[in-house]
Image: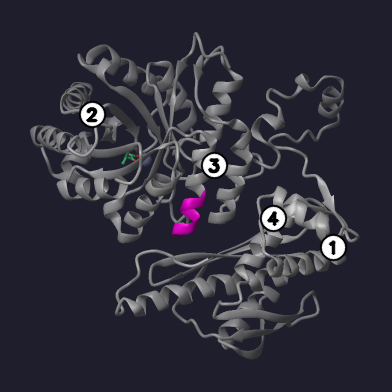
Amino acid sequence: MSTDKTERVYIFDTTLRDGEQSPGCSMNLEEKLKIAALLDDMGVDIIEAGFPMASKGDFDSVQQVAKTVKNATVCGLSRAIRKDIEVCAEAIAPAEGRRIHTFISTSPLHMKHKLQMDEDTVIEAIKESVSFATKFTDDVEWSAEDGSRTEDDFLCRAVETAINAGARTINIPDTVGYATPNDYSALIAMLVNRVPNIDKAILSVHCHNDLGLAVANSLAGVQAGARQIECTINGIGERAGNAAMEEIVMAMRTRQNQYPFTNNIKTEMITKASRTLSKITGFNVQPNKAIVGANAFAHESGIHQDGMLKHRGTYEIMTPESVGLTESNLVLGKHSGRHAFRAKLEDLGYKLGDNALNDAFNRFKDLADQKKEIFDDDIIALMDDQNRMDKTQDIQFETLIVHAGTDGPQTSEITLNVEGKSKTAKASGNGPVDAMFKAIRDIYPHDETELLLYNVHAVTGGIDAQAEVTVRLQEHGHIVNGKGADVDTMIASAKAYVHALNKLAHIRAVSLQNGGAAPIYEVGP
Ligand code: KIV
Ligand code: ZN
């Protein structure tokens, strides 16, 4: 990418705020810090880490992100309310680069029904909130919520007011994903042409994907003059999600003739970011999803394969390597020794003491007995699973026997260790998974818990691939994701369920310590 003739577009990632707001995508503190570190390494300019006033959990995670992020500006969201802004300022205070993002609705529909405020009152609120925010940082962003359904004259007045009050970034959200690329580009161009002080701020786009147009709208906005794009990894977010960062940056990289802009993203980290987020949230991307779907670089038909062999450019507009997709290397097998295993772990970023290495090596040998070829992803799944099976957890999985198939009834007999005591239960059900979950319920009653999701995903290709199972449970408004991996899908399912139950047990324990007050966020491994 040339940097001399081209203009810079800032990438504002809101995976941890708008993304995390989507049902079932909630992350615990440790998970948020992992994503923040990844975004920082990727070269994201601004990380919107949360909405500090929303809960103590949000406050803590924004503050921890602010303490740990090295390069990116850390941003917190706040309504046009003084208390929100003060709390937001406190949460982002430890960061070197700090941004307060304050917003208020500007569309007639929102002003009348949601805010019950008239135009003049909204203008006063903009003046007051933006100028108050500038007392804490000179990096203040203001958003016109439902901006794409706002009347032009009023939007111009609101934007001019926010800039005069000190906002340096003006964001125009297509909050409900209603705009089309033509509408949205005309809207941004209208602001560029009509707002007298627009040169004192960077215009930003924030598009939702209700009509599947979020990325197209964002790019149209940039062509019309915006220079910041708000987006999320894998496009997660409210309802149909936000604009997907990987699609935006790869469109800019691949179509420089249309989008002659630079950005700071290391696109080679896209696959890692997408997979890490999927693992954490349990939301796998659809196989045909652009850039990060399992089939995005697969060429199935004979004609395409023939073309690819003759010249890759026949059917490939970007290389898999450019998004960090490399063939998963065959690394180790049954005969590999401890030394090679340790070297591989270090290569993958795991540094273990001698005892932990012994445990991991034994588990690796067990896996190698069941699976001929061990890939990097297998080792990562094995290590993640080992961390989840931490011996300090209340409930430990021990053994499982299932009866499945056409000759019913399907039954499961499971043994768990609950707080140091081995307990066994047997149950029948609609298939072995249902039977197993019932047996777990018999051993460890949890009547107020609801199963929201059960998802199986193969870690690698091949019929001997390890299964990675996600189980999402909800109890009194707390949603947790449990994960388990094994070559046996039933064992992976049991481990995932137990992992989720341990997380809920931890939340209950924290609640008791707080004198019965509901804990604010998921805690624990
Ligand atoms: O979609 C939206 O309008 C938002 C704002 C709060 C920026 O997320
Ligand atoms: Zn949004």
Q: Residues within 10 Å of mark 1 (few under 14, many from 20)?
A: some
Q: Amino acid at mark 2?
A: Ala
Q: Residues within 10 Å of mark 2 (few under 14, many from 20)?
A: many
- Tell me where the magenta segment starts and ends, as one range: 28-34
Residue at 37% from the left image edge and 46% from the top image edge: 66
State the residue position of label 2: 167
Q: Which dot, 4 or 3, sits closer to the camera? A: 4
Quadrant where the N terminus is found in the figure: top right
Secondary structure state at the residue bearing disc 3? helix
State the residue position of label 3: 234
- Residue 159, given in percent of the width and then of the height, sits at 21, 25
Q: On the picture, is 309 further left or further right than 272?
A: right
> N-terminal of the two: label 2 or label 4?
2
Residue at 70% from the left image edge and 51% from the top image edge: 346
Q: Residues within 10 Å of mark 4 (few under 14, many from 20)?
A: some
Question: Would you place residue 465 above or below residue 292 in this image?
Answer: below
